[in-house]
């Protein structure tokens, strides 16, 4: 990858946190109002309801809980396709922080955390995370988000006034895992490899599943195998990723899922085989359809058990106005 696209990406991130070159001309596309109404802020979370909770609970047969989270530590991979270095630091000030106090000589410790906490490690993207520059035929270009909300109206240096992660309700729904990595073994996906609709369909068939098994409001997960590099080859993990092709992204949208989760840091191939740094899946999901994204998930516990359907539980930390949240997703079956 040359330095010029990286500098361009950095400029966009520093100014309005947008992806760069896309396959479609999204700048003229109108994607609002949402199917959930012109003032909606929770997108696909509208598909959560008591019936969906009961449907998910019916998948719990053994009581096994599988953690889908990577441990957050100072040695984890940090997204690096930007002109600045992401940071994560945990410090115990004083250690012990306070004390001893009282006749019983009590001491205790507290944490100081610094860095891009909502976008590092296993993490969840809120609808404020991504936008698109909309360029009307007669008018000035402007940054817009899910449901057409304008950057000028909702953005603030101390948190978004709308679409922040605090809007996201607790999530308990059905989880569906499509294990692409096992379906193509012993071949492995590499940087820039695109996952097609046919790949998704073949992996489902291998698992004894059909497209119809993916229902509105489900959480859909894609195992690319990239998670194996999390601590074994951080440079490769960060350099780029395989991911869904634009057509596969469209296929996912038709399923009306609640969220899409992957074992890497994006839902598209980055850079793709055409050299684009960001194909438009982030925009298709978050901006146009209110479908949430979860990244850097650990699927190893599910893959080892050949478990592809499960109850899925997650709650975002409600940082007011934040673009995302650290994630602790879990599968129960």
Image: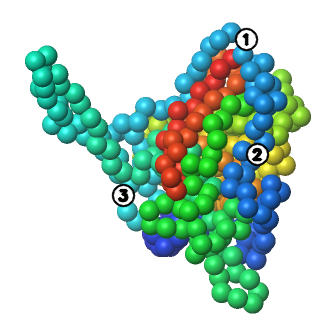
Place residue 217 in its image quadrant: top right
Q: Secondary structure at mark 3?
A: loop
Task: Work out how far the residue at label 2 is from the one at label 3, CA to CA, in angstroms.
Answer: 36 Å
Q: Which residue is mark 1?
A: 61
Pick whichever, 233 or 186, lies toward us: 233
Callout 1: helix, strand or loop?
A: loop
* Residue 28 placement (x, y as % from top left): 76, 77
- In three-dimensional space, the C-alpha distance between marks 1 and 2, rounded to whole angstroms, equals 27 Å
Q: Is residue 28 above or below residue 311?
A: below
The residue carrying pointer 2 sits among few (fewer than 14), some (14 to 19) or many (20 or more) residues within 10 Å by Cα, namely some
Image quadrant containing the C terminus: top right
How far across and how far down the image is residue 303, in percent? 64, 23
Residue 183: % across, % down: 72, 30
Q: How many marks?
A: 3
- Return the residue at label 3: 85
Residue 46, numbered label: 2
Residue depicted at x 70% and y 88%:
139
Residue 42 placed where, x, y %? 69, 51
Dividing the picture into quadrants, the one containing residue 262 is top right
Q: Residue furthest front?
A: 103
């Amino acid at each position: 990858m040359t330095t010029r696209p990286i500098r361009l990406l950095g400029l966009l991130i520093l100014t309005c946190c947008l992806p760069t070159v896309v396959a479609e001309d999204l700048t003229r596309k109108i994607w609002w109002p949402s199917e959930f109404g012109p003032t909606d802020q929770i997108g696909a979370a509208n598909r959560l309801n008591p019936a969906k909770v009961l449907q998910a609970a019916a998948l719990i047969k053994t009581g096994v809980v599988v953690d889908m989270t990577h441990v957050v530590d100072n040695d984890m991979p940090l997204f690096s396709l930007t002109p600045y270095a992401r940071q994560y630091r945990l410090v115990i000030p004083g250690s012990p922080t306070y004390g001893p106090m009282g006749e019983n000589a009590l001491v205790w410790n507290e944490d100081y955390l610094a860095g891009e906490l909502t976008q590092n490690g296993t993490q969840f993207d809120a609808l404020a995370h991504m936008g698109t520059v909309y360029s009307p035929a007669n008018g000035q270009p402007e940054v817009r988000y899910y449901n057409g909300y304008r950057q000028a109206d909702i953005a603030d240096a101390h948190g978004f006034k709308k679409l922040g992660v605090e809007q996201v309700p607790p999530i308990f729904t059905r989880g569906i895992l499509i294990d692409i990595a096992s379906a193509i073994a012993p071949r492995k996906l590499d940087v820039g490899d695109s996952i097609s609709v046919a790949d998704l369909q073949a992996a489902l068939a291998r698992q004894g599943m059909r497209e119809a098994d993916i229902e509105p409001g489900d959480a859909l997960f894609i195992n690319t195998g990239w998670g194996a590099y999390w601590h074994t080859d951080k440079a490769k993990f960060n350099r780029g990723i395989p991911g869904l092709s634009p057509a596969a992204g469209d296929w996912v949208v038709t399923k009306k899922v609640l969220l899409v989760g992957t074992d890497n840091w994006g839902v598209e191939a980055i850079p793709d085989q055409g050299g684009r740094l960001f194909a438009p899946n982030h925009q298709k999901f978050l901006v146009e359809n209110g479908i949430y994204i979860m990244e850097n998930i650990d699927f190893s516990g599910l893959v080892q058990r050949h478990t592809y359907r499960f109850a899925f539980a997650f709650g975002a930390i409600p940082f007011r106005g934040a673009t995302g949240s650290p994630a602790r997703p879990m599968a129960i079956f």
